[in-house]
Image (cartoon, rainbow, N blue to C red):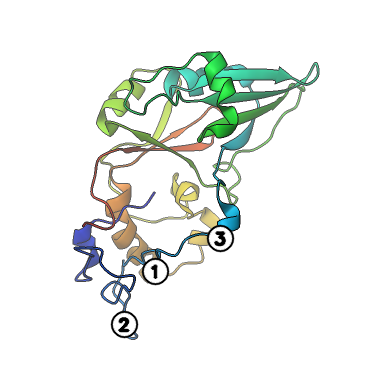
């Protein structure tokens, strides 16, 4: 999520050409730490035993399956692979973006999407229990270890204009809206690992440091709620990265 601009590194050198595994110019020296600073991962390969591992899907529970399907399909462009009706009241639904091409040229039939299900990435699984009192709370209502779902789009400003025309879509943080103050009632706080209970434990100096370091990275992001109150983070595909070659 966080993409630190080179201008924010406050003197720390970025890699101009990747010719070594060591990062002496990125790691802060003892007693001379300047924030923010990145620590780049190594080139060491993963354990060979994990070859072929990848994240296939994430799962959420919903209070209203119809509302969730409308949001994720009509607003965010997911396709429905299937809904498995396990019983009269319990169902499991799988959604995915077409994997034929990220640039919008790819198209897959429902049969093709299902055939590639276990070889795909970024799928969404939705559990729904149709009971009278389904009051399960989202992470925005009861902060926990789940922060947000991240979506990359070709043009962040274009999707914001589109979202603003769609009834029922709640934008909680707009593109370009500045992150200038960290309070314990910050709406998007739980989405970036800063829930109210945690922020309340920070000193004013610590809060200001987080705003200074994180603010420019959050400014171009959009946050919306799905129908259950889960945070969806939207960022543009183009933009400066952490390391420039």
Q: State the residue at coordinates (43%, 25%).
A: 76
Up-down: is 54 above or below 195? Answer: above
Instruction: Specify which label sits upstream in the sequence, 3 or 2.
Output: 2
Whether residue 52 is visible, yes or no, is yes
Instruction: Mark 3: give few (<14), some (14-19) or many (20+) Cα within 10 Å.
Output: few
Residue 103 screen position, x and y as percent: 31, 26
Q: Name the residue under label 3.
A: 47
Q: Mark 2 points at which residue?
A: 29
Q: Where is residue 25 in the image (x, y as percent from the top left)?
A: 25, 74
Spatial separation of the CA atoms under disc 3 and disc 2:
30 Å
Discs 1, 2 touching: Cβ within 8 Å: no
> Of discs 1 and 3, which sits in the foreground?
3
Q: Which of marks 1 and 3 is nearer the N terminus?
A: 3
Front of the two marks 1 and 2: 2
The image quarter in which residue 206 lies: bottom left
Q: Which mark is residue 35?
A: none
Say which of 193 and 14 sits in front: 14
Q: What element carries label 1?
A: helix
Vertical placement of 113 versus 231: above or below? above
Q: Residue at x 64, y 23 (%)?
A: 93
The residues bearing labels 1 and 3 have C-alpha atoms spaced at a distance of 37 Å
**What's the mark number on residue 206?**
1
Between residue 154 and residue 198, name the one nearer to us: 154
Residue 171, x across and y down, in percent: 39, 31
Residue in the image at 31% along x and 67% along y:
37
Residue 164, visible in the rendered structure: no
Q: Position of residue 203 (x, y in %)?
A: 43, 70
Neighbor class of circle 1 (other Cα within 10 Å; few <14, some 14-19, many 20+) is: few
Q: Quadrant of residue 111?
A: top right
């Amino acid at each position: 999520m966080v993409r630190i601009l080179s201008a924010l590194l406050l003197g720390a050198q970025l890699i101009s050409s990747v010719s070594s595994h060591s990062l002496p110019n990125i790691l802060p020296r003892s007693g001379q730490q300047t924030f923010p600073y990145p620590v780049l991962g190594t080139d060491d390969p993963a354990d060979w035993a994990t070859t072929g591992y990848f994240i296939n899907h994430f799962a959420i529970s919903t209070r209203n399956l119809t509302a969730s399907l409308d949001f994720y399909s009509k607003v965010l462009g997911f396709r429905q692979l299937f809904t498995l009706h396990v019983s009269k009241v319990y169902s499991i639904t799988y959604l995915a973006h077409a994997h034929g091409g990220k640039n919008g040229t790819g198209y897959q039939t429902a049969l093709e999407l299902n055939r590639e299900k276990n070889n795909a990435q970024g799928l969404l699984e939705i559990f729904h229990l149709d009971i009278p009192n389904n009051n399960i709370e989202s992470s925005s209502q009861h902060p926990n270890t789940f922060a947000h779902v991240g979506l990359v789009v070709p043009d962040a400003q274009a999707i914001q204009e589109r979202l603003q025309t769609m009834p029922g879509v709640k934008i909680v943080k707009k593109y370009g809206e500045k992150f200038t103050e960290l309070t314990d009632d910050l709406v998007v706080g739980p989405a970036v690992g800063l829930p109210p209970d945690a922020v309340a434990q920070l000193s004013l100096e610590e809060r200001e440091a987080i705003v200074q370091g994180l603010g420019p990275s959050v400014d171009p992001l959009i946050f919306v709620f799905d129908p259950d109150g889960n945070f969806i983070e939207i960022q543009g595909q183009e933009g400066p990265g952490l390391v420039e070659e």
